[in-house]
Image (spheres, rainbow, N blue to C red):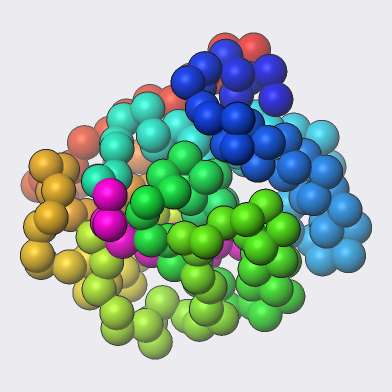
């Protein structure tokens, strides 16, 4: 939690308590359903929660925006973003029912009213959203092909509608075929 306090000092008491609750809920649920690598659960706050929250250091979603989290797994980046942006609608999808059940339960237990979930593959989802977010589901060119149909053409924000994709490695190589993109570095100092 200290990293969250450090990088996000202006959170409300409710938001802090929601983030704190994740530190108990995820280890409990991870014992039943593997949503985070068991070796990495001790790094929950830095590797998963704070990593997801880093999007908010670069982008602010306007009230009433809609965000689709593809391949949410354990709810990342969707749940941390839903805590940060309570007036934004988040739809979290994954093809694995057990993972969606964990995400639904955690969202309910911390009182998130702006999160809906679906057990579905993105190829079968035809709904439109202002933004699509994800964490390294596949190569970006492949992800773009799967998800571009879900980005709405109607712009309601200062920030152009589009895809926000968290991924490590040599991202520049994957972006060679794209004209319009911006890459941001995320460095968490411990």
The answer to whether residue 137 shows anywhere in this view is: no
**Residue 93: % across, % down:** 50, 71
Horizontal arrangement in the rendering, residue 30 relative to residue 3 (left or right):
right
Q: Nearer the viewer, residue 132 or 10?
A: 10
The total number of labels drawn is 0
- Which residue lies most toward the bottom here? 124
**Where on the picture, by quarter, is residue 145?**
bottom left
The answer to whether residue 11 shows anywhere in this view is: yes
Horizontal arrangement in the rendering, residue 1 relative to residue 86 (left or right):
right
**Residue 35: % across, % down:** 73, 59
**Where on the picture, by quarter, is residue 188?**
top right
Most common SS among magenta residues: loop
**Residue 158: % across, % down:** 11, 42
- Vertical order, 149 against 14 (above or below): below
Quadrant of image for the N terminus: top right
Does residue 69 belong to the magenta stretch? yes
Taking the spot 88% from the left edge, 53% from the top edge, the residue there is 28
Taking the spot 83% from the left edge, 58% from the top edge, the residue there is 29
Does residue 106 belong to the magenta stretch? no
- Vertical order, 84 against 102 (above or below): above
Quadrant of image for the C terminus: top right
Taking the spot 60% from the left edge, 19% from the top edge, the residue there is 5
**Residue 34: % across, % down:** 79, 61
Taking the spot 29% from the left edge, 45% from the top edge, the residue there is 61
Extent of the magenta region? 63-75
Horizontal arrangement in the rendering, residue 124 relative to residue 18 (left or right):
left
């Amino acid at each position: 939690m200290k990293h969250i306090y450090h990088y996000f000092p202006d959170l409300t008491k409710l938001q802090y308590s929601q983030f704190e609750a994740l530190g108990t809920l995820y280890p409990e649920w991870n014992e039943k359903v593997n949503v985070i690598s068991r070796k990495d659960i001790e790094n929950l706050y830095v590797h998963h929660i704070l990593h997801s929250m880093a999007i908010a250091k670069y982008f602010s979603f306007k009230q009433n925006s809609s965000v689709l989290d593809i391949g949410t797994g354990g709810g990342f980046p969707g749940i941390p973003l839903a805590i940060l942006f309570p007036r934004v609608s988040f739809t979290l999808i994954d093809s694995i029912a057990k993972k969606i059940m964990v995400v639904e339960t955690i969202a309910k237990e911390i009182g998130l009213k702006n999160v809906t979930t679906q057990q579905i593959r993105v190829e079968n989802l035809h709904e439109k959203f202002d933004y699509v977010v994800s964490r390294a589901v596949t190569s970006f060119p492949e992800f773009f092909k799967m998800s571009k149909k879900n980005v709405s053409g109607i712009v309601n924000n200062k920030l152009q509608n589009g895809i926000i994709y968290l991924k490590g490695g040599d991202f520049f190589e994957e972006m060679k075929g794209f004209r319009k993109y911006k890459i941001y570095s995320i460095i968490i100092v411990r």
